[in-house]
Every structure is written in C-alpha cells, then in structure tokens.
Image (cartoon, helix red, strand yellow):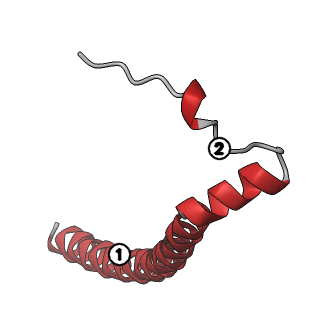
Amino acid sequence: MRLLFQYGFYIAIFVSALQVVITRHETRRLFVELQALERTHDELNEEWGRLQLEQSTWAINDRIETFARTELGMKMPEQSSVVLLAR
C-alpha cells in the first residue's frame, strides 16, 4: 500500500512538472505572437498616418479648383447667373 502511494506521488510530481513545461512553452509562443501583432499594429498606424497626410494633400482647395478647371472644363459662374437665397 505504501509503495502504491509513493508511485502515485511520483506520477503526480511528474505530471505537475510536465504541465509546468507545457505552460511555459505556451507562454513563450503567445509572447512571440503578441510581439508580431504589436509590430503589425505599429506598421498599420504608420500607414494610417501616411494615408491621412495623402488625403489632406489631395483635399487642398487649390488642387480641387485646378482639377475642376483643367480636367473637367469647369469655370466660375458669371456674377449675373449667381442667385443668393436668404432664409
């Protein structure tokens, strides 16, 4: 009976040690995954900043007016054809 208890105790210690190893390995794997996701997050933030800068550049009024005049053939309306509506 005592021998059975000792073997049971050794098995419990072995299983516990094995679980520690498995947990540490999983923790390291998750840490590597977290670093990769943080790197991707930083890259996406940089790209977002570049896109916002590009959008603000394209939205400049002079650029829009030049595009409307040259590419679309638009022009400012004559003063006589402008009607102001007051509320």
Q: Which residue is disc 2 drawn over? A: 76
> Which residue reaches farthest left?
2
Where does the N terminus fall, quadrant-wise?
A: bottom left
The answer to whether residue 24 is left or right of residue 8 is: right
Residue at position x 45%, y 82% in the image: 35
Closer to the camera, 58 or 11?
Answer: 58
The answer to whether residue 12 is left or right of residue 83 is: left
Identity of the amino acid at label 1?
A: Thr
On the image, the x and y values in percent for residue 25 come to 44, 81
Res 63 label: none
Where does the C terminus fall, quadrant-wise?
A: top left
On the image, the x and y values in percent for residue 21 come to 38, 83
Residue at position x 57%, y 68% in the image: 51
Res 23 label: 1
Residue at position x 31%, y 80% in the image: 20
Rendering quarter of residue 30 = bottom left
